[in-house]
Amino acid sequence: MYVPINENERFEEVRKNILINAQIEKVWEYVATAEGIGTWFMPNDMQPIEGKEFILQAGPWGNSACKVTEVNPPNRLSFEWGKEWLITFELKEVDGQTELTLIHGGWNDENQTEFGESHAEVRSRMSGGWDGLVLKLKHVVEA
């Protein structure tokens, strides 16, 4: 994973927060299992085991290699997505509901994705995409 020498090189992380009307353990199942993630994000073969490599099936962009980097049930799960990105799900119980924070880090204005697009171009698109995805997660969990 790329780590910038100069912190000013890096774009801010994409952060999305949402309150889900469900117990934290239920939300955990949707962010920390292959089946759960597949219902609202992408098909995958993830297992919540630190160091476990897996594949996200990214549709027209092909398969993306990933690796689980942190598992702290039911509060935090992180994984590397491709060569540079880090996805983190933070869950916090709030009055019988779950506050989810999704963090997408690893942006750098000098880098390009594996598909040849600049991080600046992709970050904007991904930020908007995450808006819809966390809403989809909320609807799936609350159904």
Image (tube, helix red, strand yellow):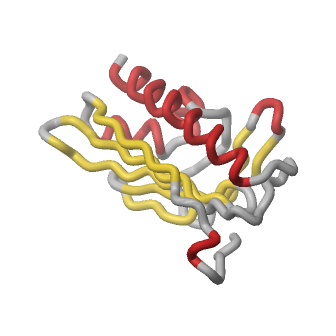
Q: Residue furthest right?
A: 116
Q: Residue at x 48, y 52 (%)?
A: 103
Q: Residue at x 38, y 52 (%)?
A: 90
Q: Residue furthest top?
A: 143
Could you tell whether 99 is left or right of 14 in the image? Answer: left
Could you tell whether 115 is left or right of 126 in the image? Answer: right
Q: Residue 86's image quarter?
A: bottom right
From this view, report whether residue 133 is shown above or below residue 143. Answer: below
Q: Nearer the viewer, residue 20 or 18?
A: 18
Q: Residue at x 67, y 39 (%)?
A: 44
Q: Residue 99's image quarter?
A: top left
Q: Residue 56's image quarter?
A: top right
Q: Position of residue 45 (x, y in %)?
A: 66, 43
Q: Residue furthest left?
A: 95
Q: Position of residue 23 (x, y in %)?
A: 25, 36
Q: Residue at x 44, y 50 (%)?
A: 89
From this view, report whether residue 143 is shown above or below residue 137. Answer: above
From this view, report whether residue 131 is shown above or below residue 25. Answer: above
Q: Quadrant of the N terminus?
A: bottom right
Q: Quadrant of the C terminus?
A: top left
Q: Nearer the viewer, residue 19 or 76?
A: 19
Q: Position of residue 96 (x, y in %)?
A: 16, 36
Q: Nearer the viewer, residue 68 or 128?
A: 128
Q: Position of residue 48 (x, y in %)?
A: 52, 53
